[in-house]
Amino acid sequence: MRSGLFVTVLGLMILLFSFKKTETITITGTVNDEQGQAIPFASITEKGTSFGTAANSNGSYSIKVSGKNSTLIFTAVGFETKEIKVKGRNVIDIVLKVSSSKLEEVVITGHHAQKQF
């Protein structure tokens, strides 16, 4: 009886310690262009996840990521996408380069219906 209880307790301990604790960290920073101007509402996502946020009107952002080895993806309309490895940092300020080819890809369409009286 005692050996059965011991095996059960030992099995539960191994099971509990086999689950790796997820370390969530918060990254903050700013997103700017090459002239140092803020890029408002740039998109910041953690690669391989659905975690994401957008920079505010001053280009500042804050995002929680799953660990110190995560990779962040920075995107904004008219700018080149940039991937940055977190490498344990808590502050990542980023500079995005203007992409002339991306500007050519943007198409704006609008539809407007008006009821006549």
Image (cartoon, helix red, strand yellow):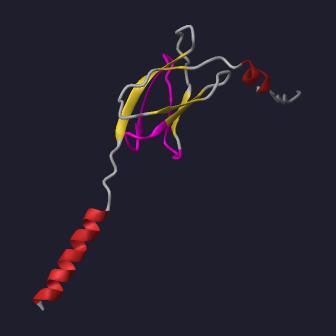
Q: Tell me which corner region of the image, top left, top right, bottom left or bottom right, holds residue 69.
A: top left
In the image, residue 43 lies in the stretch drawn in magenta: no
The one nearer the camera, 7 or 31, is: 7
| Placement of 89 over or under 20, stated as above or below | above
Name the residue rendered at 56%, 7% in the picture: 35
In the rendered image, residue 58 lying in the magenta stretch gets the answer yes
Given residues 113 and 46, the one toward you in this image is: 46
Q: Is residue 99 left or right of residue 28?
A: right
Outermost residue toward the right? Answer: 116
Q: Is residue 85 above or below residue 11?
A: above
Vertical comparison of 63 with 95: above or below: below
Q: Position of residue 40 (x, y in %)?
A: 55, 19
Q: Position of residue 53 (x, y in %)?
A: 50, 34
Q: Quadrant of residue 74?
A: top right
| Residue closest to the far top | 35
Residue 51 position within the rendered picture, expressed as x and y whole percent measured from the top left: 49, 42
Residue 32 higher or lower than 2, as above or below: above
Q: What residue is shown at x 56% (from left), y 18% (from top)?
A: 39
| Residue at the spot 33% in from the left edge and 46% down from the top edge | 23
Q: Residue furthest bottom?
A: 1
Give the quarter of the figure containing the C terminus. top right
Would residue 101 be found to the left or right of residue 1 on screen? right
Q: In screen coordinates, is 99 left or right of 83? A: right
Mark count: 0
Q: Which residues are magenta?
A: 48-71
* Rendered residue at 17%/88% (across/down): 4
- Quadrant in which the N terminus appears: bottom left
Q: Is residue 17 left or right of residue 3?
A: right
Residue 97 found in image quarter: top right
Residue furthest out toward the left: 2
